[in-house]
């Protein structure tokens, strides 16, 4: 084994100082960053008071809202008057104007039994009692007095007793509200009710095979209109789901995104040449245009939409204008930075031949900058489809306004799910289209 003497050691240290004599930052930089992140995490927990927020959050509402996205409910109300029990359904019930569901049974003794779900949850109503069966327990409730009362037992945990009302929570299946001489049941079903045809359509509640048979070869339901045209009209003008209005608003959103991005790109392209230092050697012009791009970008698209809806009124014009202003700033900055990073040798070579400025730009600059322009513009176009949905909620038109109206009622979550699903499909298709266009125009498509 050889021994390294002191002079040899000093020589090695002098040759590799970056390894053997690392600075404090090099030795402890990673550790300090990790400690900083941990400290910032503790600070964020304290600043936002996360333990209190988590403890006081209404987590049960998450499940309620999600269940309402994929289900609908029917709410019959049973009224006891003497020996007679009558049932009333809300106006615009999903079951139509004269419903007779098979889950409501009129018994021989005059009582009515409602099957709330197929797992043993049911309510039987007679002239003096409402008997609720759920979670393996049967609870009789007297409804003949001044207020409803549980008979012969304590109310179970899933039942809440108020002064003039008893509420039985049956989970996803629904709930039962019991008051004197009146029982209201909310029964929940998976799926979207009347998605194709509403209750006013002659095709309502018919099996799919019968509907297809009527459309293909059945007698005309309306003498002056074919069954196919009638079916399409009933679908398009479905009063519950408003397919025609929703799809029209979705198309408006797509047009807003396309028009705003296109106009923003057309405005940003010439200005970017003036903003690029290596193309336009005028510092004043460069700085003015770059600060102009910063101003357009710093005002959020939502704020521009608020300004323009006050100027032009609500509608797609304000939305397209908001996207145009934002994209003019964003794309202008991206284009100018792309121009400043090009290789000047091709440009100088073409310039040395005595070519005009237009030709120098066409053959010396454009081949280098086109991939950047195409990539960034397509990405912004795809992103603006999502952005157009948000600005629609403040009155800029499109499906965003429709979505906000459905959410504001707090009762049409299945319609919200429908529109969210449409937006997801459109964004997915636009993502695929933009990727395909980028690959084709930039020559990176798989062969």
Image: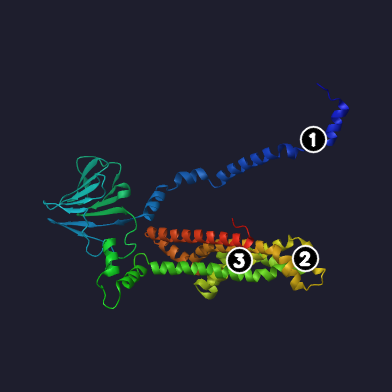
Q: Residue 150, position in %: x, y?
A: 22, 44
Q: Residue 137, position in %: x, y?
A: 24, 40
Specify the label residue 326 is tagged with.
3
Secondary structure under the numbered disc 2 in the rendered image: helix
Instruction: Identify the residue under disc 2.
Output: 347
Kindly tell me whether residue 186 is visible in this rendering.
yes
Secondary structure under the numbered disc 1 in the rendered image: loop
Of tags 3 and 2, the one toward the viewer is 2
Instruction: Indicate the quadrant where residue 422 lies.
Output: bottom left
Question: Could you classify mark 1 by the number of other residues whose Cα lies within 10 Å: few (under 14), some (14-19), or many (20 or more)?
Answer: few
Instruction: Indicate the quadrant where residue 286 lies.
Output: bottom right
Quarter of the picture holding the C terminus? bottom right
Q: CA distance from mark 2 to mark 1?
A: 45 Å
Q: Indicate which disc, 3 or 2, sits on the residue closer to the N terminus.
A: 3
Specify the label residue 21 is tagged with.
1
Q: Which residue: 39% across, 55% down? A: 69
Q: Residue 412, position in %: x, y?
A: 37, 60
Q: Is residue 135 left or right of residue 30?
A: left
Q: Is residue 142 left or right of residue 276?
A: left
């Amino acid at each position: 084994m050889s021994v390294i003497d002191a002079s040899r050691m000093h020589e090695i240290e002098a040759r590799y100082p970056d390894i053997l004599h690392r600075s404090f930052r090099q030795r402890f930089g990673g550790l300090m960053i990790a400690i900083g992140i941990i400290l910032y995490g503790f600070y964020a927990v304290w600043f936002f008071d996360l333990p209190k927020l988590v403890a006081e959050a209404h987590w049960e509402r998450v499940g309620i809202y999600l269940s309402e996205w994929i289900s609908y409910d029917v709410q019959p109300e049973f009224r006891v008057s003497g020996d007679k029990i009558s049932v009333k359904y809300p106006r615009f019930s999903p079951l139509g104007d004269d419903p007779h569901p098979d889950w409501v049974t009129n018994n021989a003794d005059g009582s009515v039994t409602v099957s709330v779900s197929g797992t043993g949850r049911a309510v039987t109503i007679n002239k003096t009692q409402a008997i609720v069966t759920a979670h393996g327990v049967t609870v009789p409730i007297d409804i003949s007095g001044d207020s409803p009362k549980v008979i012969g037992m304590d109310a179970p945990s899933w039942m809440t007793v108020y002064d003039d009302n008893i509420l039985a929570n049956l989970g996803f299946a629904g709930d039962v509200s019991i008051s004197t001489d009146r029982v209201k049941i909310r029964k929940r079903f998976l799926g979207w009710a009347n998605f194709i045809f509403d209750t006013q359509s002659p095709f309502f509640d018919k099996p799919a095979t019968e509907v297809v048979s009527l459309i293909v070869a059945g007698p005309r339901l309306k003498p002056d209109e074919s069954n196919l045209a009638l079916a399409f009209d009933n679908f398009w003008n479905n009063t519950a789901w408003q397919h025609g209005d929703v799809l029209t608003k979705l198309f408006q959103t797509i047009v807003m995104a396309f028009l705003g991005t296109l106009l923003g790109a057309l405005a940003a392209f010439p200005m970017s040449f003036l903003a690029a230092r290596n193309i336009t050697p005028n510092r004043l012009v460069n700085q003015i245009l770059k600060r102009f791009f910063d101003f357009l970008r710093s005002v959020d698209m939502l704020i521009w939409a608020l300004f323009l809806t006050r100027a032009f009124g609500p509608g797609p014009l304000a939305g397209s204008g908001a996207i145009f202003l934002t994209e003019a700033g964003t794309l202008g900055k991206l284009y100018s930075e792309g121009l400043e990073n090009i290789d000047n040798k091709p440009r100088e070579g073409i310039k040395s031949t005595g070519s005009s400025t237009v030709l120098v730009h066409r053959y010396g600059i454009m081949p280098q900058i086109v991939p950047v322009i195409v990539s960034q513009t397509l990405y912004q176009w795809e992103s603006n489809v999502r952005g157009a949905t948000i600005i629609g909620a403040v009155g800029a038109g499109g499906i965003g306004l429709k979505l906000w109206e459905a959410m504001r009622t707090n009762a049409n979550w299945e319609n919200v799910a429908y529109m969210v699903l449409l937006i997801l499909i459109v964004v997915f298709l636009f993502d695929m289209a933009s990727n395909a266009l980028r690959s084709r125009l930039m020559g990176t498509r798989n062969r």
